[in-house]
Image: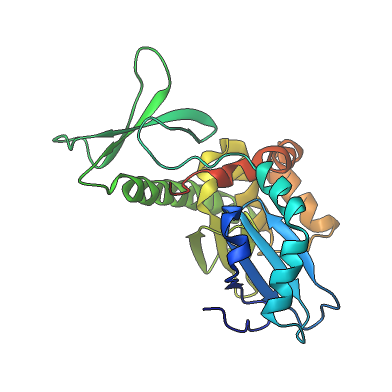
Amino acid sequence: MSRVADDQKPVSLDDPRLDDLGAPVEVRRHPKARRLTLRVSRTRRAVIVTLPSQCDLGEAGSFVHRHIDWVRERLGNLPDPVPFANRQVMPLRGVPHRIVFIKPQRGKGVVHLHKPARGYAEIRVAVVGDNGPQRLRNWLFKQARRDLDARVLEHAKQLGVRPKKLVIRDQTSRWGSCSSTGALSFSWRLVMAPAFVLDYVAAHEAAHLREMNHGPRFWALVDRMVPEMDEAKNWLQVYGMDLHRYGVSE
């Protein structure tokens, strides 16, 4: 059942008229909203309605239904999701790899990389039952942490700073963030991007430990640490959203 949303905390909208959309419809209340607004999130593949505090959920459902053709068009233009499934192809550090589910092998570990004589490099995942997708996701989190730990440590050393904590998450709105307490947070999906892109994001957040802003001195620090800064920013702008296709369950 639907319930009233607290400020911007999303809730699902139960409306039988929207059952065939093939995407969740979420409602967010915003105290400063003066009218209902509608958007389709490319990263979360969800329809999001924002409404003023005085509107009820019935109005939100009617609003989406009045714009149903617009919503369907936007959803139809989203790239297809790529689940973590056997034989699917996904990027790892900017290089296409094929996911291959195998039986456990002695001495090979849960996940290992393999380069056949021809075709894609492979991410081989030892599967027990149906745990292949979760094992692959756990491994990718660890790989992202390893890569980001190394690059943040290097950049922090150059800057003479030290992060309080480094956290890997599946965040959809930012590739990285730096809190006022000095904790750094990154998206695990950066491990799918080319190394110079991950390095840029690591340097960007490490630089915030010196400059908690995006002023000229901040950008000068990042530019000094990452010669390919502009290329990395452009890559994220053009290809970054595509990384959110991967790992979606079937």
The answer to whether residue 206 of the structure is visible from this angle is no
Residue 18 position in % (x across, y down) = 62, 61
Q: Find residue 8 and report its image quarter.
A: bottom right
Q: Find residue 214 and report its image quarter.
A: bottom right
Residue 234 position in % (x across, y down) = 75, 39
Q: 201 and 182: which one is in front?
A: 201
Q: Is residue 82 left or right of residue 160?
A: left
Color style of the picture: rainbow
Q: Is residue 106 left or right of residue 38?
A: left
Q: Is residue 181 above or below residue 201?
A: below
Q: 68 and 86: which one is in front?
A: 68
Residue 144 position in % (x across, y down) = 47, 48
The answer to whether residue 118 of the structure is visible from this angle is yes
Q: 109 and 243: which one is in front?
A: 243
* Residue at image point 68% right, 64% down: 48
Residue with the most extreme top position? 117
Q: Is residue 35 left or right of residue 95?
A: right
Q: How many marks?
A: 0
Residue 146 position in % (x across, y down) = 43, 48
* Residue at image point 65% right, 64% down: 209
Q: Is residue 214 above or below residue 42?
A: below
* Residue at image point 18% right, 38% down: 104
* Residue at image point 58% right, 43% down: 243
Q: Is residue 93 above or below residue 29?
A: above
Residue with the most extreme bottom position? 54
